[in-house]
Amino acid sequence: MSQTNLESYWLPFTPNRYFKRHPKMVVSAKGAYYQTDDGRQLFDCLSGMWCCPLGHSHPKVVEAFKRQVDTLDYAPAFQVGNDTTFKLAERIADIAPAGLDRVFFVNSGSESVDTALKIALSYHRVRGEGGRFRMIGRERAYHGVGFGGISVGGMVANRKGFATLMLPGVDHLPHTWNPAQMAFSQGQPDWGLHLADDLERLVALHDASTIAAVIVEPVQGSTGVLVPPLGYLQRLREICTKHGILLIFDEVITGFGRLGSNFAAQRFGVVPDLITFAKGVTNGTIPLGGVIARREVYETLMAATAPEHVPELFHGYTYSGHSMATAIGLATVDALAEEGLTQRAAELEPVLQNAVHSLKGEAGVLDIRNFGLMAAVDVESIAGKPGLRAFRVFEHGFANAHLFRVTGDTIAMGPPFISTPAELEQMIDGLRAAIRASFKD
């Protein structure tokens, strides 16, 4: 067991007091598995945090890291470029939906969301519609932990804790999950298209001339794999186009193959104006995120009347387009293509679907949802102790070779694309055992 001093580090989104009494330490990772400090292997049920589709220590990524650190470890992002970053932007533009071909790099999903909101505001201002300041998010949405992301997000704990500094003028669409109509759906539910029409209600309430953008996750990931009803995203696109509102897809989780396509926009056949990304772009090895913009949005900002020596968008970070991160991004995107891993994710989708839905009928299982290589299982809460049931599932899984991700009383899964069908079936068997154990504790 590790003898590391645990006191100095404040863990994020973690009950620190509990953790430091019951530490769970990993010391290495290879392929689809972590190794703990007591020598056990854990199957990585969520690809790290939705961010390691290639598995861990992929040779192309390792080689890219070693080569780049010997060549160009860092270069300024302001007024100076480097070849690696331009190449990755080109590669991302090549695989993005048609018309989205301008890439702004940041360092995380949270930063990509705040950046997209700034781009939307700037776009309307340059067009002479500076009155468009409102942002429309959605209930149960997670758009990171920046104040912009919390504002358009719909996770109660995040909003409650920091409400005094959230953006003004933000409103929210209803979320799309209705267990009475959708429980145990496989793929997209066929009920709920009408929920998109609530955007027309918000337009009528606020007037379209005040609304800059609508931001949604194509599949809501962090609050439990909430899959959009058939036609829902298409309807949002229609309404946004009708009223001159930008549509932003937050693809921090769904980008780079998670749904069996490069981006969720392509899987659903809906082209937004801006796409945010992060996580899978570097296989989780080094932080990197960004925004992919429709060319017309970019060119509108480039056509602003400011002098040529003045930045068109007053925004960026010290580590925007970091040479190490973009080198690893190139290796990751190349590996996804050369090894057919996005197609492999598509091929594994029915395996995961059949396996996870075999849990229907288990005592305490309230709902099961899946889409692409994503799945979630809701379990019955313990009276007066929300979240404790799923936490027990997590504990049992960790003790028995599976690293699950829980949010509330939901267990989410998004395994690496390199997983085998047998590993996915074993993962669900492990979850079955953990759920049963949680009702005996």
Image (cartoon, rainbow, N blue to C red):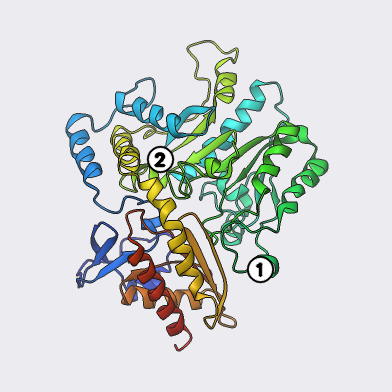
Q: Nearer the viewer, residue 163 or 142?
A: 142
Residue at horizontal 65 percent and vertical 54 percent from the top:
229
Amino acid on which the number 1 mark rests in the picture: Pro
Camera sees residue 320? yes
Q: Position of residue 406 (x, y in %)?
A: 47, 67
Instruction: Report x, y in % for residue 385.
Output: 55, 79
In this orientation, which residue lies closer to the viewer: 204 or 17?
A: 204
Label 2 sits on a secondary structure element that is loop
Q: Quadrant of the C terminus?
A: bottom left
| Vertical arrangement, residue 289 with respect to residue 227, above or below | above
Q: Answer above or below: position of 96 versus 360.
A: above
**Depth check, front residue: 164 or 424:** 424
Which residue bears the numbered disc 2?
Answer: 107
Task: Give the secondary structure at mark 1.
Answer: helix
Query: Identity of the amino acid at label 2?
Result: Asn
Image position of 364 with respect to 418: above or below: below
| Farthest residue, direction right | 204
Q: Residue at x 54, y 10 (%)?
A: 307
Q: Which residue is mark 1?
A: 179
Identify which residue is drawn at 42% across, 43% down. Answer: 256
Q: Give the Cα separation between the discs numbered 1 and 2.
A: 36 Å
Residue found at the very far top of the displayed protein: 307
Instruction: Residue 135: tell me if it is visible.
Output: no
Q: Residues within 10 Å of mark 1 (few under 14, many from 20)?
A: few
Q: Which mark is residue 320?
A: none
Indicate the position of residue 302 as horizontal and vertical percent values. 55, 17
Q: Is 222 situated left or right of 321 in this image?
A: right
From the viewer's perspective, is residue 424 above or below residue 166? below
